[in-house]
Image (tube, grey):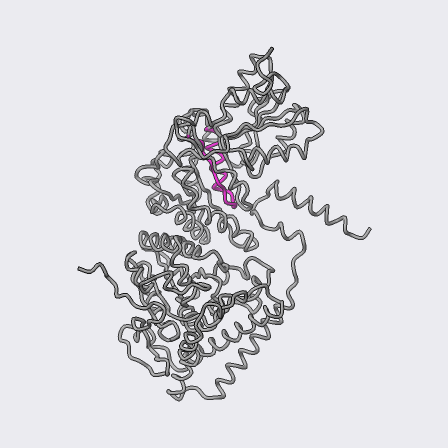
Amino acid sequence: MSSQTTPITDPAQDLSLAERLVAPDGRRLSNPELDPFVADIDPARLRELHRDMVILRRLDTEGVALQRQGQLGLWAPCNGQEAAQIGTARALDPIDFVFPSYRETGVLYARGAQPGDFVRVWRGEEGAPFDPQQLRVAPLQIIIGAQTLHAVGYAMGIKHEKAREVAVTYFGDGATSQGDVNEAMVFAASYQAPVVFVCQNNHWAISEPVAVQSQFPISGRAPGFGIPSMRVDGNDVLACMAAMRWALAHARDGKGPAFIEAVTYRMGPHTTSDDPTRYRDPEELDSWKSRDPIARVEAYLRGLGEIDDEQIAAAHADADAAAREMRAECLGMVTRKPLAVFDEVYAEPHSGIDRQRDEYAAYLSTFEEA
Amino acid sequence: MTQLTLGKALNAGLHQAMKSDEKVVIMGEDIGKLGGVFRITDGLLDEFGAARVIDTPLAESGIVGTAVGLAYRGYRPVVEIQFDGFVYPAFDQIVSQVAKLHYRTQGRVKMPITIRIPWAGGIGAAEHHSESPEAYFVHTAGVRVITVSNPQDAYRCLQQAIASDDPVIFFEPKRLYHHKGDVDLDAPLADAPPMGLARVVRAGTDATIITYGAMVSTALDAASAAEDEGLSLEVIDLRSISPVDYDTVAASVRRTGRVVVAHEASREAGVAAEVIASVTERCFEYLESAPLRVTGHDVPYPPAKLEKFHLPDLDRILDAVDRVLDRPNSLTGAES
C-alpha cells in the first residue's frame, strides 16, 4: 500500500496537470471545464487583455529603469507573470477587495491604479501608494503571506453581512510555506469565507526553487484544508481568467473559499537588488521564454486573424505613454515635510508622540533663519 | 454601585460594548459555549450569536490576522489571547500589521482592534501561563497598552479600548479576576476620564511608588505597612503604560522627590526602566535619591513553586522604599 495520495511531479517544470486554453504556439485547446467561463470573451476583449499585458510589461521595464537611474530604491519586477495577474484581476468585480503581496503591479493596474501609484512606495515616499478603500486593494504586503489572513478576515465580514462580494489574496510559492498562509486556509475553510487564494507559482523565492517549498503541486494542498483548487497555466491569460471566474463564482455563490495555483515564471530577478545568474540555469530561463504570455495571446489572435501589426503597434504606443506618465509622476513627487514622520501613528491624540513631535519641531526650528 | 469581581466587570464591559455597537465582534479560543477559560465572555454567545462571538481555530496569528481583515471592513474586533504566553505566535501580525497600518496608509485604514490578554503570575499556573510580555508592546509604536487593577477600571477601560480607533493591547491581571470592587454600571462612558490617565490611588509625601496591574494591590499593602512605621507613601496606578501619563507621575515625583517603580515583568529594558528615564529627564532637580526598580528577575518565568521568589512582594517594595529614603535596608545590613 502506498502512502502517496497525489502524484508527485517535478514541481519545477511540470505543467502537465495545469489547465490550459491556449497552447504556447497560440492554438486554442478545448477544455470542457473552463470553456464555459470564457464563452463571452470575444476577440475585442482578448485584444484588451493583450493590450493590458503589453502596458504592464512596459511599466515593469520602466520601473527597473527608474531604479537603475536612482529614482526608486527598489523594484520587484513581474515580467513573465502578466497573464497570471491580468487574467485573474480582470475577472474581478469592482466591489471585490484584493490583498496583494508586493509583486502585483498588474493587479494594481487592473484595479485602476494611477501612474504614480506604481512607484510611490518603491521611491520611499509613502507606506501605501493609494487609498485602499477607494481602489479596493490593500497596501502592498512585504511580510510574506501575512495578507492572506487579512483577506480571510475581510471575507468573514462579507459572510456576516451576506454580501455578494469576494476577498482575493495574491501570494507566491514561497509564501505557501508560511504559517499564516496555512492558518488562512484553516480559517477560510472553518468559516466557509468567500475568499479566493491566488498563488502565483513563479518557481523562485529569491534563490530557492519551488521544490524547496513543496514536493507536491501546490494546488494539491488546498483540498487537504477542504478548499477546492485548480492548477492553471499561469502564462495563458484566457485560462487564468476562466479559472478565476470559476473560483470567484464559487466564493460568491456561498460555497466557501477556492484556491488557484497559476504556474508561471519570474523572468526577472526577485528585485532589482537580486542577481539570479548566481543560482539560475540559463536554459531554464530560455525554456520559459518560449512560453511567453504576451507572445501566446498574440499568436492566438493572429491565428484568428483578429490582430494586425497596426493594432499591436498601437498597444505598444499606449504602453510607452503609460510609462512616460509613470516616470513623470515619479520624478515630480514632492517628499513630505520633516514633521510628517509623526503623522498618523495613532488615530487619536497621544501624549508620547505629541511630545516627541514638539521636541523635534523645536530642534528643527534652530536651523531656521533668524 | 454594584459589587462585581474584576472578571465579571470585564464581562459587563464587553456586554455593554457589544450592545452599543453592532460592529463589535469578539473572537478567540473557547470564548463561545465555554465562555472563555476564565469565563470573561460568559453568556455573550447566547445573547449575540455565533456571528459576533466567534470561537476560532487554535492559531493566534490567525486570530489577530483575521481581526485585521475584519477591521479593514469596518468592524471593531475584540480578540482574546487565551494566556499571556500564547501571544507570541501573533507577534508578527501585531507588530508588523496591527500597529502599522494606520501609519502606512496615512490614516486611511483604521485598526480599532482590542487584544485582551489574561496576564501575569501569582496563580501557580503551568509554564507559559504567567508571563508579563508588556514591554514588547510598549516598545511598539502604533499600539496603545492598557492595564487594569480593579473592577471599576476594568469595566470602563475595556469599553474605552474597544471604542478607541487605535489598536489597544489590554492586559488583565488574572490573579485579580476574582477580586471584588464597586462598579458604577450606569456612569456614561462619555463622562469618564480618558483611559490613558494615571491615578493617584493613595496620597503620600515621603516617596512615590509607581506601578500597574496586580502590583497596585501589593503596593497599597506596602504603603499601609509603611504607615505603621510613620512613612507616607504615594501610590500611582499608571493604567496606561503606553503612553504613560507623565503629567500625573511628574507632579507626584516633584512632591515626594523619591521614586520606586514596581512591576512583575523582568527588569532589563522594561517599563520601569523607561518610566525612570522619563521621570529623570523631567524631574531631575526634584529627585532626592536615585529612583529604583522592583521587578521580576531577568530569568525565564520560573516554575510555580518558585514564583514567590520571582514576583515583587510587599517586603521587596518596602526594601526599595528604605533604599530611596536612605533608611537601613538590605544593602546596608540590619539596623544597628
Give the quarter of the figure containing the N terminus of chain A.
bottom left
Q: Quadrant of residue A144 in the image?
A: bottom left
Q: Is residue B224 visible?
A: yes
Q: Residue furthest right?
A: A370
* Residue B107 image offset from top left, x and y in percent: 55, 52
Above or below, comparing residue A213 to residue A243 in the picture = above
**Magenta stretch contains residue B162:** yes
How many numbered marks have been drawn onto this rendered protein structure?
Answer: 0
The quadrant in which residue A251 appears is bottom left
Q: Position of residue A227 (x, y in %)?
A: 30, 59
As drawn, B20 above or below A343: above
The residue under the point 55% across, 68% down is A114
Q: In the depicted view, which residue is nearer to us: A38 or A118?
A: A118
Task: Give the residue drawn at x 36%, y 52%.
Answer: A183
Residue at 60 percent of width and 24 percent of height: B208
Tell which residue pokes out farthest to the left in this image: A1
Task: Return the residue found at the far top.
Answer: B336
Using the image, determine if residue A302 lies above or below residue B174: below
**Which portion, as a residue range, is magenta?**
B151-174
Taking depth in this image into account, of B164 and B190 the one nearest to the observer is B164
Left or right: A65, with A309 as reference point:
right
Viewer-nearest residue: A233 or A351: A233
In-front residue for pair B37/A234: A234
Q: Is residue A287 magenta?
A: no
Where residue B128 appears, as percent x and y from the top left, is 40, 36
- On the image, the x and y values in percent for residue B139 come to 55, 42
Residue A132 placement, left or right of B277? left
From where the camera sits, is residue A158 visible?
A: no
